[in-house]
């Protein structure tokens, strides 16, 4: 049966500044979600803080990473491999985040990472999204291109194991006047399903999980879920346990 649980992913980015602070935030998040059902929570701390989840006894909370390197091992100073992440208990990896793309990550590299992440039985969270919208709909072609290139050679049997996050770059870290609306999300959700349907099939498109990310906060979170999002990717507010907990309680 299709899993109806919503997924809430906290992307801590390059925060907080110390292991001690990371522990406090993680433990407070745990307190906030105790007893919550029908929501799968994923916390994606920076690599050095992945150990904070050790011994966590709460079932619906998993560990995610913010990226991975595409090679299995060897002379790659500063890089982190899939096997390392697996050994830390990582179950999800954010791939193709706009902030990583900005630093040079291409669709081709993201595609390689998706293929190897799936092989390792870790769930890739593929981020797509335009930097701005235009009246001619070029942003739709841009998103389609991202999807086609990033999903190249991914077999249809694996699409159910991927989460696609629509993250409009203009709405990430945005002030309230620039936040995306649930209607703007729905438009892209339908569009992504259409692209998946064209590449694979209508059936595959219907079970593809599409979540929303970009300035999600307690006041707008529920709207995206009611509009049909399978979950949310949360940056800033995932570092504030009270807000993160509120979002989770609101949408369950
Ligand atoms: P934000 O970040 O919630 O701070 O806008 C979201 C993201 O970049 O994943």
Image (cartoon, grey):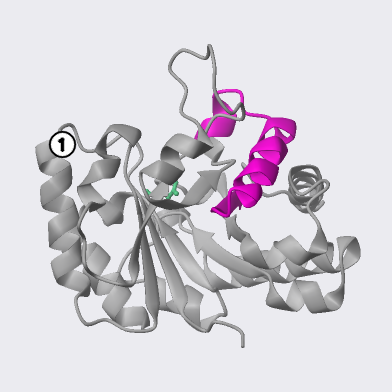
For residue 9, say whether it is visible: yes
Question: Is the N terminus in the top left, top right, bottom left or bottom right quadrant?
Answer: bottom right
In magenta stretch: residue 93: no
Question: Is the C terminus in the top left, top right, bottom left or bottom right quadrant?
Answer: bottom left
Q: Position of residue 130 (x, y in %)?
A: 65, 46
Mark 1, ligand 1, within 8 Å: the answer is no
Classed neighbour count for the residue bearing mark 1: other residues with Cα under 10 Å, few (<14), some (14–19), many (≥20): some
Residue in view at x 52 percent, y 84 percent: 4
Q: Pick whichever, 151 or 99, lies toward us.
A: 151
Displayed quadrant of residue 66: top left
Displayed quadrant of residue 116: top right
Residue 245 vs 19, above or below: the answer is below
Dot 1 corresponds to which residue? Answer: 19
Question: Relative to 125, is 250 on the left or the right?
Answer: left
In magenta stretch: residue 127: yes
Q: Where is residue 250 in the image (x, y as percent from the top left)?
A: 31, 80
Residue in view at x 63 percent, y 59 percent: 162
């Amino acid at each position: 049966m299709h899993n109806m649980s919503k997924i809430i992913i906290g992307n801590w980015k390059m925060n907080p500044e110390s292991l001690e602070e990371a522990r406090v935030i993680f433990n407070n998040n745990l307190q906030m979600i105790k007893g919550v059902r029908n929501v799968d929570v994923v916390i994606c701390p920076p690599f050095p803080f992945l150990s904070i989840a050790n011994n966590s006894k709460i079932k619906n909370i998993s560990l995610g990473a913010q990226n991975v390197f595409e090679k299995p091992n060897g002379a790659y100073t500063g890089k982190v491999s899939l096997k390392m992440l697996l050994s830390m208990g990582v179950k999800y990896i954010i791939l193709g985040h706009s902030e990583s793309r900005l630093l040079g990550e291409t669709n081709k590299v993201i595609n390689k990472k998706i293929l190897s992440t799936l092989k390792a039985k870790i769930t890739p969270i593929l981020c797509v999204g335009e930097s701005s919208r235009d009246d001619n709909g070029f942003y739709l072609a841009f998103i389609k291109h991202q999807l086609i290139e990033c999903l190249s050679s991914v077999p249809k049997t694996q699409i159910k194991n991927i989460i696609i996050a629509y993250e409009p770059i203009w709405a990430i870290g945005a002030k309230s006047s620039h936040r995306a609306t649930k209607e703007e999300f729905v438009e892209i959700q339908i569009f992504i399903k259409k692209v998946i349907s064209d590449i694979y099939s209508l059936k595959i498109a219907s079970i593809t999980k599409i979540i929303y990310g970009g300035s999600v906060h307690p006041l707008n979170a529920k709207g995206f879920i009611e509009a049909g999002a399978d979950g949310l990717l949360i940056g800033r507010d995932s570092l504030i346990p009270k807000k993160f907990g509120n979002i989770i309680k609101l949408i369950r």
